[in-house]
Image: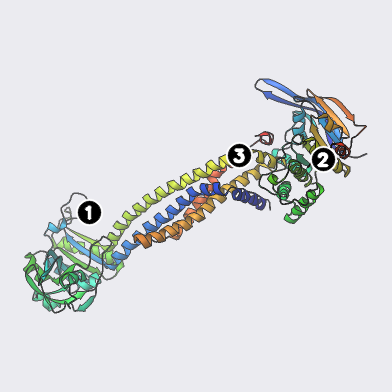
Amino acid sequence: MRLYNLFKIATKAIVLNKTRTLLTMLGIIIGVASVIAMLAIGEGSKESIRTTISAMGSNMITIRPGADDRGPARGSGGDVQTLTLADYQEIKEQTDLLSYITPVVNGGGQVINGSNNWPSTIYGVNPEYLNIKVVGLQSGSMFTDAEVKSASKVALIGQTVVDNVFPDGQEPVGQMIRFDNIPFKVIGVLEEKGENTFGQDQDDVVIAPFTTVQKRILAIDYLNQIMASAISEDDAPEAVEQVTAILREQHKLMDSEEDDFTVRSMEELISTFSSTSEMLTVLLVAVASISLLIGGIGIMNIMYVSVKERTKEIGLRMAVGGKGSDILMQFLIEAILISITGGVLGVILGLGATVFIEKFLNWPTSVALYSIVISFAVCAITGIFFGWYPARKASALDPITALRYE
Amino acid sequence: MSKEIIKIEDLKREFTMGTETVHALRGISFSIKEGEFVTIMGSSGSGKSTMLNILGCLDQPTSGTYEIDGVSVKDLSRNELATIRNEKIGFIFQSYNLLARTSAIENVELPLLYNSKVSTEERRKRAINALEMVGLGERLHHTPSQLSGGQQQRVAIARSLVNNPVMILADEATGNLDTRTSYEIMSLFQELNKKGITITFVTHEPDIATFSSRTIVLKDGEIMQDYQNQNVQSAAKELAKLPKQDD
């Protein structure tokens, strides 16, 4: 009952000072809105990285030559020639945790069809590649193991290549193209995958038997990498260990020697990128929190002014029987109401901003429920924290002095 | 014999100003009975304001006793004093002290907001009653800025009545009003007094004292005079004697 009355008194004071209250709220509104929008951006980018990587095959395992090159100042793994076809065969024979495996050789070159040409990358693989990369075909078919064995000059091309070397809308399957002057027969077109999170066009590729690419185009006897697929996502970490053990054995590495290859699962890649975007989120939230803090200080400031301005009113309230605790609650409720109303408006504005960012800037966003709950809680706490001191000051006033205050 | 509302014995109040001690009240004794209309007079520095603060339970005596309605005030805490003010005293100030931009009825309801024993309906009913008593039944929803000085003081009087206090304590309640309006207010006080309400009126204007039944004159913190007024003037009659206003 008493609390309800105090609540009414506080609401009245807020309503009587609409403009000032709104301006005070502005700090909180902007603070909360930015926390929500920033978290939505952070969460969104994290989620999109995860989806892209999963789309690439979440149980994919890549084996590259050379030591782990994630650290600074290492040579690029591509230049190292420690991975061979024998390694591929050894892994294939010994492992029981991989469902698919393919050697990969790749090189850049010019795709030519008559007067049209286009710079692209050719990947020499075996038929299992499509299963590993989880990519289907728009038309035509994949080459066979027999065609790999015979190093046939057949190729599949991605949509970007189709668009650029068959600009007239010709059906590519069955046509002849040249890659670095080697003629290939197009036997299929890959399903469109678009850009991945890292901005790489996944459709700008030519796929051919690895034997053909290795011998006729690159003229090398080593592999650029080996790609494989674990039986399931859960098996991936164990598969990584198994492959590492097989390759160490195969490369006759002593215990003291470092790996001369790198085995990485997608899971690792996901966590690497996630941690980057998490860091970004933390930074964004830190900036937003500062504006929330400033909003809180704004409330404290205005509550001080309000207490000073209403000294005589406080004196009167005390004279007619208001206790110190009544006055304290009145001002505290006022501060909390301002901050929570600001919080509600901030959440609405934040959600609006998120929709705007998603629609007009095309950034991936995802509003996490916890961000709303947290900003709300922070608002209430801000109100209590910054409202407390001015309210205390009001409640400690001497009624005689307050009544005489002009 | 009617009961004593106020009982004061050898009351002293001292203030320490730096190293000096100011004796604002130097041992005062008097009592006020139910239904009395007392004016406390004195020039500035006489201890009048200090007396008012103590009577209103806004301040406590340094020594001596002060009992209001049987409750000794001396050792009460801040909160207990607030409750006494809320239930036993009705304040009227020189500058009305109404809440701005707040309707008459809400201003009158104010003391009851701090009394959890009074329900919302009861509060509203009592506020309307009080405003009708002071002749403002038609102006319940006017804000102070829409009311004249006299009307604002009437709202303040209604506010002092709303909690059914044992005593109304007025501090220079006519100080901001012209002669005519102050006679109107005094006549309202006399009416209320006739209904049995105890009134203590602190003032420095001698003609106000002629409307009360008893006058206590303070000087330098002591009682100089305390006399029953044998010839109480009627404020209503004095009002009728004033020259008619043009408007």
Label 1 packing within 10 angstroms: few (<14), some (14-19), many (20+) = few
What kind of element bears circle 1? loop
Q: Amino acid at mark 3?
A: Glu
* Gap in angstroms between the C-alphas marked 1 and 3: 63 Å
> Quarter holding the C terminus of chain A?
top right
Q: Quadrant of residue A394?
A: top right
In this rendered view, identify the residue nearer to me: B18 or A32: A32
Residue under pointer 1: A70
Name the subunit of mark 1.
A
Percent position (x, y) of residue B63?
A: 77, 28
Percent position (x, y) of residue A347?
A: 48, 56
Q: Is residue A139 left or right of residue B50?
A: left
Can residue A160 be seen here? The reply is yes
In this rendered view, identify the residue nearer to me: A196 or A237: A196
Q: Quadrant of residue A318?
A: top right
Q: Which mark is residue B184?
A: 2
